[in-house]
């Protein structure tokens, strides 16, 4: 028995990743940082432009998950000892 898939979730993720990849590649070819292409992709498939619009509710939930993962990655990059030492000395 196949698991039912949510079409809005699949289409939002596929469109977002596909457009971001293509515009990131285009930005790299133009010698711009790929983040410029990613930002343009977000603008293009956002709810305020004509054409394909991703599901706003799902996109907001995915954005919150992305922020959590980003903060986790930032936390992995920092060491706790220098922060504690600077707090002891500076406080």
Image (spheres, rainbow, N blue to C red):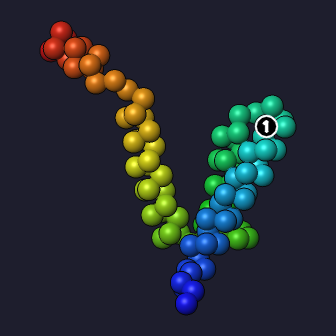
* Residue, far top: 89
Corner quadrant of residue 37: top right
Look at 74% across and 45% down and name the residue there. 24
Q: Which residue is mark 1?
A: 28
Q: Quadrant of the C terminus?
A: top left
* Residue, far bottom: 1
Residue 66: image location, x then y, percent = 48, 52
Residue 10: image location, x then y, percent = 61, 72
Asked whether, in this view, residue 30 is left or right of residue 66, the answer is right
SS category of the residue bearing label 1 = helix
* Residue, far right: 29
Along the line of sight, the residue nearer the viewer: 49 or 74 = 74
Asked whether, in this view, residue 59 is left or right of residue 38, the answer is left
Q: Is residue 19 above or below residue 37?
A: below
Residue 64: image location, x then y, percent = 43, 56
Asked whether, in this view, residue 76 is left or right of residue 24, the answer is left
Look at 59% across and 77% down and name the residue there. 8
Q: Is residue 24 visible?
A: yes
Residue 5: image location, x then y, percent = 56, 81
Look at 55% across and 90% down and name the residue there. 1
């Amino acid at each position: 028995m196949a698991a039912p898939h949510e079409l809005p979730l699949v289409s939002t993720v596929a469109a977002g990743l596909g457009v971001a990849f293509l515009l990131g590649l285009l930005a790299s070819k133009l010698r711009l940082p790929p983040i410029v292409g990613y930002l343009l992709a977000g603008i293009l498939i956002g709810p305020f432009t004509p054409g394909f619009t991703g599901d706003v509710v799902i996109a907001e939930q995915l954005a919150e998950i992305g922020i959590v993962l980003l903060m986790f990655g930032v936390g992995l990059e920092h060491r706790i000892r220098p922060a504690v030492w600077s707090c002891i000395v500076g406080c």
